Each structure stands twice: as structure tokens, then as C-alpha cells.
Amino acid sequence: MECDIELNKANCNCTYEPCSRKGKCCQCIAYHLKFDELPACVFPPEVEKTYDRSFARFVEVFADRSR
């Protein structure tokens, strides 16, 4: 499977502008996992903007939505 970087960029909600991994999902996921984080694309926009991409924040956000 080839990575369609331009299509990925069009759907990327990451607000960190100098990011060199935009559109390169495999690199993005690997980078964030190295820091025990998840990438921007798994968070709603209002949470992504806080740059708290921790697993704990992910659980907090989605645990609240399932109630």
C-alpha cells in the first residue's frame, strides 16, 4: 500500500504547523508512540489544539463520550 501524502495532508487535523510528518501517517504514529502519545488525528479538534496527546487524555475524552 502506498502512502498518498497529499490526500493524508488534506485530512490531517494537526495544528502544529512546522511538523515535518504531516501526511506521513506511519512516521507520525511511530513518532508519537515513542513519546507515549497518540497522533492528532485521533482527537477531536478542541482537544488536539491543547497538544495533550497522552493516552490518559484520550481515555478521558472518549470515556466521557460513552456515558
Image (cartoon, rainbow, N blue to C red):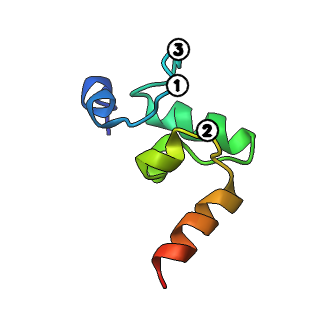
Judge left or right: residue 37 versus residue 14. Answer: right
Residue beneath disc 3:
18
Callouts 1 and 2 close, C-beta under 8 Å: yes
The quadrant in which residue 50 appears is top right
Real-space CA distance between mark 1 and mark 2, rounded to the nearest whole angstrom: 8 Å
Amino acid bearing label 1? Tyr
Residue type at mark 3 is: Pro
Q: Are marks 3 and 2 in contact (CB under 8 Å)?
A: no
Q: Residues within 10 Å of mark 1 (few under 14, many from 20)?
A: few
State the image coordinates of residue 51 (x, y, percent, origin top left): 61, 38
Q: Distance between the residues labelled 3 and 2?
A: 14 Å
* 10 Å crowding of disc 3: few (<14), some (14-19), many (20+): few
**Amino acid type assigned to the residue bearing label 2 in the image:** Tyr
Q: Picture coordinates of residue 22 (x, y %)?
A: 44, 25
Residue under the point 36% across and 35% down: 12
Residue 8 position within the rendered picture, expressed as x and y whole percent measured from the top left: 31, 33
Query: Badge 2: how crowded within 10 Å, few (<14), some, or many (20+)?
Result: some
Q: Is tag 1's residue or tag 2's residue first in the polypeptide sequence?
A: 1
Q: Check whether the beta carbons of the residues at disc 3 and disc 1 lie within 8 A of each other.
A: yes
Q: Where is residue 29 in the image (x, y as percent from the top left)?
A: 56, 41
> Where does label 2 land, which residue?
51
Which residue carries the number 1 mark?
Answer: 16
Task: Specify whether 5 is left or right of 54.
Answer: left
The span from disc 3 to disc 1 (Cα, nearest Å) is 6 Å
- Upstream in the sequence, badge 3 or badge 2? 3
Q: Residue 32 carries which label?
A: none
Q: Is mark 2 on a helix, strand or loop?
A: loop
